[in-house]
Image (cartoon, rainbow, N blue to C red):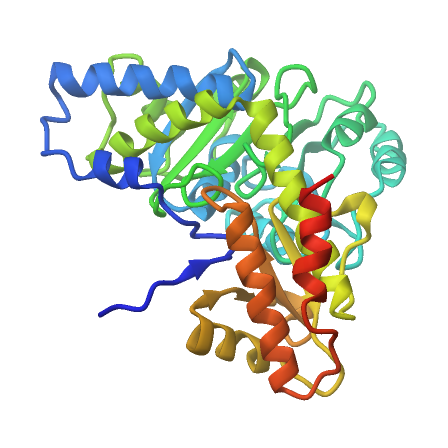
Amino acid sequence: MTEKQILLLPGPTPVPPQVALAMARPAINHRGPEFKALWEEVTEGLKDVFQTRSEVVILTASGTGGMEAAVANLISPGEKVLAVTIGAFGERFIQICRAFGVETEVLAFPYGRAADPEIVAERLAADKEHKIKAVLIQHNETSTGVLNDIQAISRARGNHPALLIVDSISGLIAADLPMDAWNIDVVIAGSQKAFMLPPGLTMLAVNDRAWQAAEKCSNHRFYLDIKKARNSGLKGQTPFTPGVSLLYGLQESLRLVKEETLVGSFARHALMRDMVRAGVRALGLKLLAEDEVASPAVTAVCVPEGMKPADIIAPLREKFGVVVAGGQGEVKDRVFRIGHLGYVSYSDILAGLAALENVLFDAGVPVERGAAVAAAGAVLGR
């Protein structure tokens, strides 16, 4: 018998039974009327989630495919971007840009901290010739558990015409990101996070300014061509064979999100964040991010002195069936990460904290038995 697992990962996240059942539906003709109806429903539903009336394209790819699509379709070789990075996924944006011949100026902030909008504003104000064509940034940096203030970053552009391209792969639905209200040009999402789906879909919401840039872009792309995707989408089709089962799952997950409401989802994720942080602190562990910038989707926890992340991750999985993630980038050997997004319940959080307490106790770390669950429960009961 397969051991039951509690997935407390920042992705992939647990899949609700209703979504899994929807994905088991029989195959249909992806050039037929049934698919057209499905496509139109999910693209309209995505606009509500992105909080935009701009067009949304769906690509059969991972979230990184969405990041690559944004660069390849909007920035020409030799053009300059400002990559604002606070962790490993900001660094991935840099790698993608350089792979596509884009001149990339890096504005890096330490792991565990959010980007400073004032510093971004100063850099853009100094760009008198408007050589910077886009600002690239993460909404929620998955590697560090830090949430950037995207509204303030958008305002920091002032009158500078640079596009604002936001990777919200692990942020959308977990944290508020009203694309139109905050004047964001492109938002990237992925299916395996708060959308509660397996990996395989990436979605990009693209406003009119960004579509104008796409028309002028001379970079190379084929499969990840968003103009092809848009033009096919307007006919209720895709340029290439889509992941139909994932789209059935997306149809159901959007219904679940609508039922909970975005406001309800934001509140639930924030509460789970606070439960995790209270429980971890009750065990005497340090957190990488300060409360003011803490992500509602994932929490990076510093390992006790003398231990490695694997000393916690392995027994959590092997003894208790609780699956958490290791660190990435500069903090790879210093932290483990607890995901609390998507189809995760309060009871999952309590079980995960109880298991963590036992792992630490077994490793000889002085902990007060029952403290983690009690602290998290106190947050839940407020």
The quarter of the rendered structure image containing the N terminus is bottom left
Write the residue at 76% across / 83% down: 305
Residue depicted at x 50% and y 57% = 9
In the rendered image, the vertical position of residue 10 relative to residue 330, given as above or below: above
Q: Position of residue 46 (x, y in %)?
A: 44, 22
Quarter the C terminus occupies? top right
Left or right? Give the position of 133 relative to 245. Answer: right
In percent of the image, x 30 and y 15: which residue is there?
Answer: 40
- For the residue pair 354 and 41, the one nearer the viewer reads as 354
Q: Position of residue 304 (x, y in %)?
A: 73, 79
Residue 238: horizontal and vertical position, in percent?
25, 26
Determine if residue 301 is in view: yes
Look at the image and tell me whether residue 85 can be seen. Answer: no
Q: Nearer the viewer, residue 206 or 263?
A: 263
What residue lies at 50% left-to-right and 45% top-to-bottom? 345
Q: Position of residue 105 (x, y in %)?
A: 73, 47
Instruction: Between residue 105 and residue 301, name the one nearer to us.
Output: 301
Q: Which of the 4 quarters of the picture holds residue 282?
A: bottom right
Q: Report the number of numbered marks.
A: 0
* Quadrant in which residue 163 is drawn: top right
Q: Is residue 106 above or below residue 257?
A: below
